[in-house]
Image: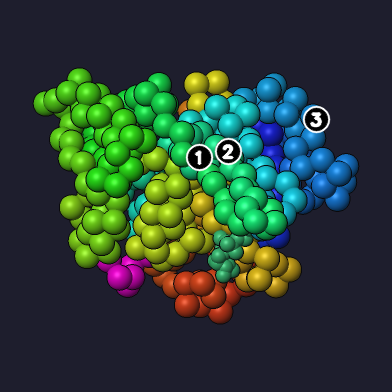
Amino acid sequence: MGASITLIPGDGIGPSIVEATLQVLEVAGAELEYDRQLAGMAAVHDSADPLPPATLESVERTGLILKGPLTTPVGVGFRSINVALRKEFDLYAAVRPVVTLMPGGRYEDIDLVLIRENTEGLYVGVEHYIGMQGDPKAAAESVMIVTRFGARRIVRYAFDYAVSNGRRKVTFAHKANILKYTQGLFLDVGHEVAKEYEGLVDFEDMIIDATAMHLVLNPYRFDVLVMENMFGDILSDLMAGLVGGLGMAPSGNIGDRMAMFEPVHGSAPDIEGQNIANPTAQILAACMLLDHVGQGEVASRIRTAIRTCLRECDTLTRDLGGTASTDEYVRSLIGRLA
Ligand code: NAD
């Protein structure tokens, strides 16, 4: 058998879109061996631990995760297990390709990549309440942490990605006009690293709010975008919207030792159990994993089948304006692979 991976089906729509993905992988001839493990709510129900030791041990062994979305309780309860996994295994680069697979959307032929810093910024989880005048929650404080080390490695990752994938430009999105220390440091490092790639890849910096506007008005002016954690979280959903929504956007979380692949979207509790979720993002996440383990030929056959399926428009799921169930879409996809 080929690569051994840790498989985390996840919560909400996760188990159903992961099962759909496994069917597609099998028919396409992917050579993967799965070690199924729990995390998130499913693990809490099983063992009261959202990130059990058995899951961590499996990841230490395989170094590779294919993951469905995980639910994070809002306001109370455990912190995001997605964030915990990225931090635990130092998966510092989130790579989010945004590609048009279906014609007739707001734009045609979009081909962008967002690279998001995954371990620092406001998402480090350093926050607390401040009590005043008898109110224990009179104020709250969250700390944004940017290190020169973290900024340098993500910007360098973006440039290396651009060079090795034949990309023409890196746009560095930031808010250094307001957050002069944290974002200012990030921006300084951006310019410093950009010098090393002069003549190889173009570089520009742009304020994050202007970046959001330009992405909506004219996405073609961008190519590879790099930014800190929270800005990347927000803009990757915006960019998914340029190519048909969250059901179409995969993500790779890459570190020096490990890599984890998942959809950008969450566990979609509002449509859980209805057999209407779009599994495309999950399947495309598996394609990124296949590229990563040297099975790019299988990945490109799956991508071609998805493209054909979506272009012929006969079995679109509801988020794409169709009426097909998850099962009907997967059957039609498998029919194009067999
Ligand atoms: P969400 O992405 O789950 O859903 C947002 C909207 O998009 C919903 O209307 C949903 O029905 C729709 N949607 C999402 N994926 C879809 C798909 N594949 N097919 C069709 N429609 C789809 O975001 P949310 O509702 O804000 O979050 C739900 C839970 O997921 C929360 O607990 C959140 O913390 C978690 N979450 C997890 C991840 C992850 O595991 N990486 C990412 C984002 C959110």
Q: Position of residue 60 (x, y in %)?
A: 68, 22
What residue lies at 46% left-to-right and 34% top-to-bottom?
Answer: 145
Residue 106 sits inside the magenta stretch: yes
Residue assigned mark 2: 126
Q: Position of residue 39 (x, y in %)?
A: 74, 43
Q: Quadrant of the N terminus?
A: top right
Q: Nearer the viewer, residue 211 or 7?
A: 211
Q: Position of residue 316 (x, y in %)?
A: 51, 72
Q: Magenta stretch mostly in which secondary structure?
A: loop
Report the amino acid beneath label 3: Ala
User: Image check: 329 left or right of 197?
Assistant: right
The kind of secondary structure element at disc 2 is: loop
Q: Which stretch is magenta?
A: 101-107
The kind of secondary structure element at disc 3 is: helix
Q: Is residue 312 visible?
A: yes
Residue assigned mark 1: 143
Residue assigned mark 3: 54
What residue lies at 53% left-to-right and 44% top-to-bottom?
Answer: 142
Q: Position of residue 166 (x, y in %)?
A: 24, 34
User: Image check: 284 left or right of 63?
Assistant: left
Dot placed on the residue nearer the N-terminal end, 3 or 1: 3
In the image, residue 68 above or below residue 252: below
User: Image check: 311 left or right of 135?
Assistant: left
The kind of secondary structure element at disc 1 is: loop
Residue 23 sits inside the magenta stretch: no
Label 2 Cα neighbours within 10 Å, binned few <14 / some 14-19 / many ≥20:
few
Q: Is residue 286 visible?
A: no
Residue found at the very far front of the displayed protein = 133
